[in-house]
Image: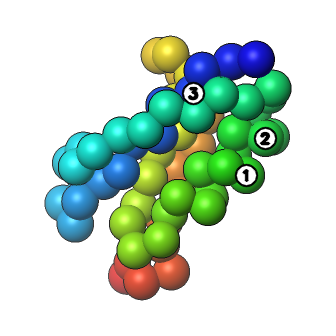
Amino acid sequence: MTDYRVYILNDKGHIQGDTLIVSADDTQAIESARKIVGARNVELWDGERLVGRFKTELSS
């Protein structure tokens, strides 16, 4: 299992908050991060490695 950090971004792309998720692999972590998106954009990180960026459908 790997600890991943999901950073929740504000309208200007700055970190507003974060949460830790523990997943078996990137695929599982991405699925979990997509559930967090909601009304905010998020970035998923494994340590110093960016795994992905996910945008809300409300973003222009």
Say what amino acid the circle numbered 1 marks: Glu
- 35 to 24, vertically: above or below: below
Q: Residue at x 73, y 52 (%)?
A: 31
Label 3 SS: strand
Residue labelled with disc 2: 28
Residue named by callout 1:
31
Which element is circle 2 on? helix
Answer few, some or many: residues within 10 Å of disc 3's Cα (few below 14, many 20 plus, some between 14 and 19).
many
Colour convention of the picture: rainbow
Q: Is residue 23 visible?
A: yes
Residue at horizontal 37 percent and vertical 66 percent from the top: 40
Amino acid type of disc 2?
Gln
Residue at the spot of label 3: 4
Q: CA distance from mark 2 to mark 3?
A: 10 Å
Q: Quadrant of the N terminus?
A: top right
Q: Position of residue 15 (x, y in %)?
A: 24, 44
Residue at figure coordinates x 47%, y 16% from the top left: 48
Q: Quadrant of residue 28?
A: top right
What is the C-alpha distance between the residues marked 3 and 1?
A: 12 Å
Inspect the image, locate mark 3, and give the three-letter code of the amino acid beneath it.
Tyr
58 up-or-down from 44: above or below: below
Q: Nearer the viewer, residue 13 or 30?
A: 30
The answer to the question of whether label 1 and label 2 lie on touching residues, with beta carbons closer than 8 A, is yes
